[in-house]
Image: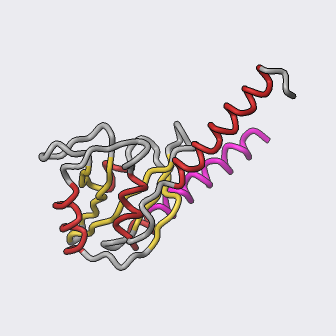
Amino acid sequence: MGLSNKFNALSLYKLKIENRSHIVSKLKTGDTITTKSKLIPLYIHYGIIERIGDEIFIVHLHPDKVNSSGGNLVKEPLDKWLVGGREIVSIQETNLDSATLDQLYKDLKDQKYDHINYNCEHFVNFAKGDYFVSRQVVKYTGILIIGVFVYYLIKNKKI
C-alpha cells in the first residue's frame, strides 16, 4: 500500500511537470499568467507574458524588486519568476501586443508597489483595460471587516 501511494504521488508530480512544460510552450506575448505559491497558497500573483524569440519574460509588480527607475514594475525571465514552487493557476489571452506592453512598462516603471492600492493584480487588470481593482484586496478586506465585527459582538457579549 505504501509503495502504491508513492508511485501515485510520483506519477502526479511527473504529470504536473509535463503539463507545465506544455502550458509554457503555448504562452504568447500579452497573455496574463496567474500563479500561487506552495508556501502561501491563499496569495495569488499576476503577471503579463512577453515572448521575445524563444525567451519568455514576465512583466509584473513585486514589492521586493526594484527596476532601474526605482519602481517595482519588473521584467524577468519566466523560469526565475516561477522559482520557489509557484504553480501556474491560469493563463488568459488578451489583445495586448509587444508595443503596448513596452509602452506600459515605460509609463509605469517608476511606480511603487502598494499592497492595497497598486499591486500585481491592479497592474494586470489595468493593462487588460479592466477595472483598476484587486479582487484579492476586496475579498480579504471583507473577511477582515466581518472578523472585526464578530470580535466586537463577542467582546461586548452581544452574541
Side of 110 relative to 64 (left or right): left
The majority secondary structure of the magenta stretch comes to helix
Front-most of residues 13 and 69? 69
Between 117 and 62, the one lying in front of the other is: 117
- Residue 71 is covered by the magenta coloring: no
Left or right placement of residue 49 versus residue 40 in this view: left
Query: In terms of image quadrants, where is residue 32?
Result: bottom left
Q: Residue at x 85, y 26 (%)?
A: 158
Q: Which residues are magenta?
A: 1-20
In which quadrant will I find the N terminus? top right
Q: Does residue 56 appear to the left or right of 26 in the view shown?
A: left
Image: 69 above or below 103: above
Residue at 24% across / 55% down in the picture?
75
Tell which residue pokes out farthest to the right in this image: 159
Name the residue rendered at 16%, 61% in the picture: 106
Q: Which color scheme does this rendered protein use? A: secondary structure
Residue 123, picture quadrant: bottom left
Where is residue 112? Give x, y as percent. 27, 44
Percent position of residue 54, x then y: 24, 69
Q: Residue 9 in magenta?
A: yes
Residue 146, image x and y in percent?
A: 69, 39
**Measuring 33% from the left and 40% from the top, which residue is drawn there?**
63
**Which of 68/126 is in front?**
126
Q: Is residue 98 above or below residue 132?
A: below
Which quadrant is home to the C terminus?
Answer: top right
- Residue at far bottom of view: 95
Q: x and y percent of residue 125 in the render?
A: 41, 63
Q: Which sits in the foreground, 90 or 80?
A: 90
